[in-house]
Image: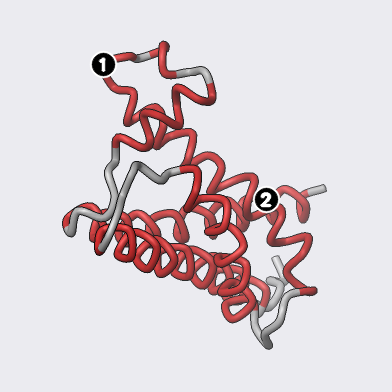
Amino acid sequence: MIGIALDGVIGALGGLVGTAAMTVGLLVAQSLGAFDMVSFADFAELVGIAGLFPANAVAVGYLVFLGGGMVIWPLLFAAAGLYLPGETYAKRGLPYGFVLWTGFAPAFYLDYSGFSLVLYLVLTLIAHFSYGFSLGAVFDYFTDRPDTLV
């Protein structure tokens, strides 16, 4: 039972690291006008919890996004990771990030056009690659660790 709980903690840690890496990519996209954090407020409204803190709907949406990045997606990666192409979990995280991006791109799209649309698609894809790679790298790090004798 302790092993299962420890695996859950490793998954959550990997999701936190991956979401942090992805957030950096999204902030870069925002600085270039290719992403808007208001998308997280729309996400919170879609989920139905924006009313909890209407003054901070962006923060509420981001926390839900973070929760998904730390719980849902790492669990799916742990279950499906061995079936993805790549020799290590970090390399397997790249196609996994691509699969997640195919849902993110239309869900967080805000009427971008022209060069902004191209930047949005490219930078969010890179951000998702960084999520998958970072998530997988944490899995690699902890699966290669020897068991302690204590």
> Splitting the image into 4 quarters, where does residue 130 fall?
bottom left
Using residue 149 as the reference point, say whether residue 89 is left or right of it: left
Residue closest to the eye, 120 or 100: 120
Q: Residue sitting at 67 percent across and 50 percent down?
A: 8
Quadrant of the image for the C terminus? bottom right
Q: Nearer the viewer, mark 2 or mark 1?
A: 1
Vertical placement of residue 118 versus 57, above or below: below
Q: Position of residue 7 (x, y in %)?
A: 70, 56
Residue 8 is marked as: 2
Q: Which mark is residue 30?
A: none
Left or right: 60 in relation to 88: left
Instruction: Say what secondary structure mark 1 lies in.
Output: helix
For marks 2 and 1 on the same chain, the one whose residue lies earlier in the sequence = 2
Q: Is residue 45 above or below residue 79?
A: above
Q: Give the residue type that dot 2 points to.
A: Gly
Q: Amino acid at mark 1?
A: Ala
**In the rendered image, the vertical position of residue 64 relative to residue 100, given as above or below:** above
- Splitting the image into 4 quarters, where does residue 50 fall? top left
In depth, the one of 48 and 23 nearer the eye is 48
Secondary structure under badge 2? helix
Q: Measuring 52% from the left and 18% from the top, which residue is drawn there?
A: 48
Residue to which mark 1 is pinned: 55
